[in-house]
Image (tube, helix red, strand yellow):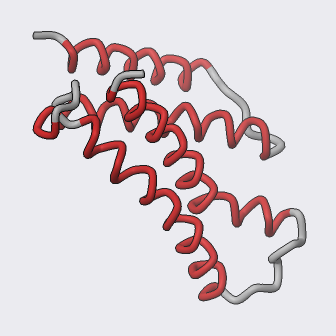
Amino acid sequence: MSQGVYSILLLIVSNVFMTFAWYGHLKLQDAKLIDNWPLIMVILFSWGIALFEYCAQVPANRMGFQGNGGPFTLMQLKVIQEVITLVVFTLFSTLLFKGESLHWNHLAAFLCLILAVYFVFMK
């Protein structure tokens, strides 16, 4: 596999950890697993998860960046990462949180993101 594919796969892994670090505690609280934890404990728990996010994010950006022999410009890496973040978040929120669903305006926003990827890769 190429550096670009590895970079994208690591960005996906990174965003799974990031989404769980940022929003997973809400699901754990809802499931009554950490509902009585003080905020500082929730923050430390999330930081612990975010460590794994950084362990994937940093190498993904290093190997994907043109300045390190990768195929992507800095702007392209950022747009790819944002699209992955929103796809992972959408899956996370619709699968794990009852009452969260996709609406027409969400789909319109995704179309705009697809256009953003198209435009950032145009020469």
The image shows residue 21, relative to residue 110, as above or below, that is: below
**Residue depicted at 68% across the width and 41% down the height:** 92
Residue pictured at 69% horizontal, 59% vertical:
24
Q: Residue 115 at what x, y percent from top left?
A: 33, 14
Q: Is residue 57 left or right of residue 29?
A: left
Q: Is residue 116 above or below residue 56?
A: above
Which of 51/95 is in front? 51
48 in relation to 98, above or below = below
Residue extending farthest front: 1
- Asked whether, in this view, residue 10 is left or right of residue 72, the answer is right
Asked whether 76 or 57 is in front, the reply is: 57
Q: Quadrant of the N terminus?
A: top left
Q: Residue furthest right?
A: 32
Does 95 appear above or below 106? below
User: Picture quarter containing residue 45?
Assistant: bottom right
User: Residue 84, percent across and down?
Assistant: 47, 33
Residue 78 screen position, x and y as percent:
28, 38
